[in-house]
Image (spheres, rainbow, N blue to C red):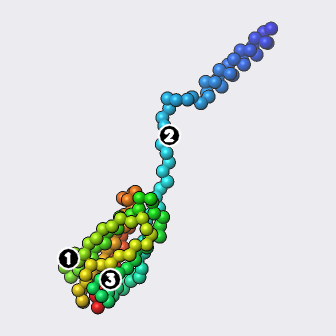
Amino acid sequence: MRHLFLTFISIVIIVTALVSCGKKSGGGATPTPIVPKEESLVIGIDPDPGTAVAVALSGTYTFKLNISSKLTTSGVKVDVITKKDADNSTVDSKSLDSNSPGIDLSTGTLNPGILCTVTVTVTSKATPANTVVKSFKVARK
């Protein structure tokens, strides 16, 4: 009889422990969803003058901005600033929003023989800290 009583008590203790350790519903904090990290922006310019001076054969220089990294649905903001090297004055400045990986761009009106620097800044609209800058020199022939 004593053996049966000890077995019964052991079963009650085990069942109580299992029930008290079970998953509780409600009252807990809502888990924070995991947001995937955005890819760092990677851009290229076509034609890419590299370290050479690009030559504009007309009043403006046209080029294509290629974004090879994955774009978010909110897209990017593109700023293009053309400045004269001689006095750092702004020739042209433009800003646009895009969801396209290929964007046709151009400088402002270039004067013959004046060396300019074109700076292209691409910023993710979803993550403003995700920014990349590329510059090149251009002169009208």
Q: Quadrant of the C terminus?
A: bottom left
- Identified by mark 2, the residue type is Pro
Q: Which residue is pictured at 40% across the width and 57% down the height?
A: 126
Among the two numbered marks 3 and 2 on one chain, the one whose residue lies closer to the N terminus: 2
To which residue does mark 2 refer? 31
Label 1 to label 2, Cα distance in Å? 52 Å
Residue 14, picture quadrant: top right
Give the left or right position of residue 40, taking residue 90 as reference: right
Q: Which residue is mark 3?
A: 61
Q: Which mark is residue 89?
A: 1
Classify 10 Å Cα crowding around label 3: few (below 14), some (14-19), many (20 and above).
Answer: some
Numbered mark located on residue 113 in the image:
none
The residue depicted at 42 percent of the width and 65 percent of the height is 99
> Where does the image place residue 2, in percent across and percent down from the top left?
78, 9
Q: Secondary structure at mark 2?
A: loop
- Judging depth in this view, the residue of 93 and 48 nearest the camera is 93
**Secondary element at tag 3:** loop
